[in-house]
Amino acid sequence: LYRGGLAERLCRLQNRERSAISFWRHQCISDDKIPSDKSGVLIVKILEIFEECTIQVAICQQLEQSPATLSPEDALINAEEPILKVLFTRETAAHLKSRPQDVIHIYPPWQKLLLQNADVPVIMNTYFSQKVLLSEHSEAREKTYGLTKMLIRKNIISLAQTFRLDDLDDKLQRESSDNQVPCAPQTHNNGGSKQHPSALSAVNDSLLEMVESQGAVGWREVQVRVVIQRVYCLPAREGHRSHTQGNKLLCATPVTNSDPPNVRLCLLVQDAYGMFSEVQLQFLSSTDDIEQYCRRWEGKSCCLAGMKILQRTTRGRALGLFSLIDSLWPPVVPVKVPGQSQDCEMMTTNLPPPSFCYILTVQSGEIHVEVDEEEQISNLYQPPAVRGLKEILQIDGCNERCSFWAQVLYRRLQSKHSVPVDQREMLLFVTDSTLQNEVHGVPKVVAVSVTASCVLSMEIIEALSAGSRLVFFKDALWGNGRIICVERTVLLLQKPLLCSAAGADLSELTGPVRLDELDSTTLANSVCALRGTVVGVNESTAFFWPTCNRCGNGKLELCPQDRELLYCNQCSEVVTTPVLKMQLEVFLSCPSRSQSTVKVKVWHEMALFVLLTMLLFLQTYEVQSVLGKEVGLLNCYVHSVTSHPNCVVLEEIVLL
């Protein structure tokens, strides 16, 4: 807030107001009596209560006095005494817990508002109010009522009705009997009857209006129509797991610690006014369903009911979420603007990006989301904009979402042994035709960092283990020269049915893949091609180990029956003819890094290892026999690049 500005002054005023109210209530509780000063006190008896726009409205009759000898039910009321409409804020109403027939003392500074064409005055600024309990009978009644939940009628006023944007015939009318909701959370039986969304009241089109009118407790009687912009999974460890049937969400069941790790299906939705919200739906026991949900639901309209607010988050607290929202802004079609005429010119220009977003979740035991899968794709839907990797590398901005179609050449799990395997970061080295066809200026292969928060389906993991695959990266994050797959990034084996690729070269690779050769610009944690001359072999670090000749298991044990034989746990058999495997460290002289010491780790199945082993066997393990031999091109992973000492450590790899 600007120092001395109106917002800062208003914030201070509100803080002082809250402090004064809290102090006054604390003083009343400490004194355990009604304040003795009755000057200016307004005494009213509640006749009826309803809620409108989060304000509790009480229709009251003014009393001249409230004798201490009488209970509220017996207080004398003159039929000629005036009727008042008293407004209580949500906080004040929660403190009073008022009911019809209660007597309320309202202390100054309350204010009376006289409206034109209205006979009933309105009483505002009722923060300093106190319910009067005048007898033991009243106290007993209060304790009894405190165990039950009172139903408060909610008058839902749409923004269109407030600003007269719709025809009179289209105004939403809410009758009291159809719109009673509990003023406190209630426990519902999951086995009880469930109300179908079509049996609910009329559908709204504003998320913000629903939040303001229904509050954080939940939307029980109303629906809001939205468009599903994205479908993705978020990692989840605890909570409740729900189940789906068709396009409907069914009841939830608790998740116990014995359940396998699961993920939560989430939707990023947008309403007709352009406002976004993240809806966290059911827990999935398998991540393989994410692709079908993306195909079935993205771009379709759906109705939300039975939602409750988990959190109101802002740009500063949820950078990842808002980077995805920013990639969908501005809207591709005109959106409504509350309180303004609905001309297209006013709905598309100079719209500020959203600054906050509500995180919604479902309430147990009801149908919450209904997707019309037969409906056509909404005009508000923005499919992922597919780009070539060359174009992505030239983006100047930071924390921008990008989607691309690339060939995965090599994957590597980051070796942080203190971190569990399922929480480690993984590097995928990818390329496409825009990089392979370029001569200078951009790398041939780029690394994509996949964080532990990015949910990968088993289909993707198994496909990458089997070999090189074309993978569609949807809504990855670009920033600081890196492509990162984070929360809300989705990896698919099939390209979405709807995606835009304006001018991008998405042709598949036809020839062999080329890597950048090792040079002075090569960085750590990259892949490169290497050629050079053998200048040394580190014999002190060379080692070999036996493996099973049937399954290749490298962790053989001594046979319990015969300690001179080896035993394979995977085959459950004795290994009589083990296969010996070896690791070597070789020093090369490379023309592209003539001033650096280049050290390459080679393994048993690598081309360089086969060459060196053959030479060593021919020369009866004389190391001098391999010196001066030229090797290359070798595919290598760069472990480290240091300047003091000037050294490059690589490892020969096999591309997928």
Image (cartoon, rainbow, N blue to C red):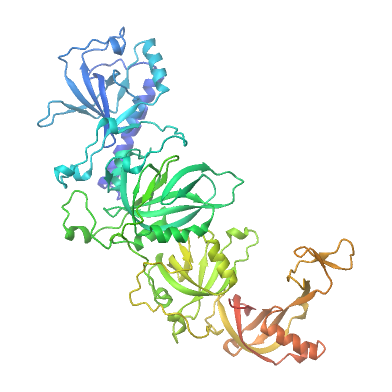
Position of the C terminus by quadrant: bottom right
The residue positioned 22% from the left and 40% from the top of the image is: 172
Q: Is residue 542 left or right of residue 51?
A: right
x and y percentages locating residue 255 in the rendered image: 55, 44
Does residue 88 show up?
Answer: no
Residue 347: image location, x then y, percent: 21, 58
Outermost residue toward the left? Answer: 117
* Between 114 and 379, the one nearer to me in the picture: 379
Question: How many discs appear?
Answer: 0
Above or below, 162 against 106 in this view is: below
Q: Quadrant of residue 549?
A: bottom right
Left or right: 155 as drawn, with respect to 254: left
Tell me if I can see residue 311 in this picture: yes
- Residue name at image x 43 percent, y 75 percent: 389
In this rendering, position of residue 603 left or right of residue 145: right
Q: Which quarter of the picture shows residue 442?
A: bottom left
Name above or below for residue 19 compared with residue 65: below
Q: Which percent across, then down, holds residue 37?
A: 28, 16
Which residue is painted at 31% across and 40% down in the image?
Answer: 200
Residue at left offset 27%, top offset 53%: 272
* On screen, residue 66 above or below 267: above
Is 105 in front, or is 575? 575
Q: In this view of the protein, which residue sits in the foreground, 382 or 75?
A: 382
Q: Which percent across, then down, holds residue 444?
A: 49, 81
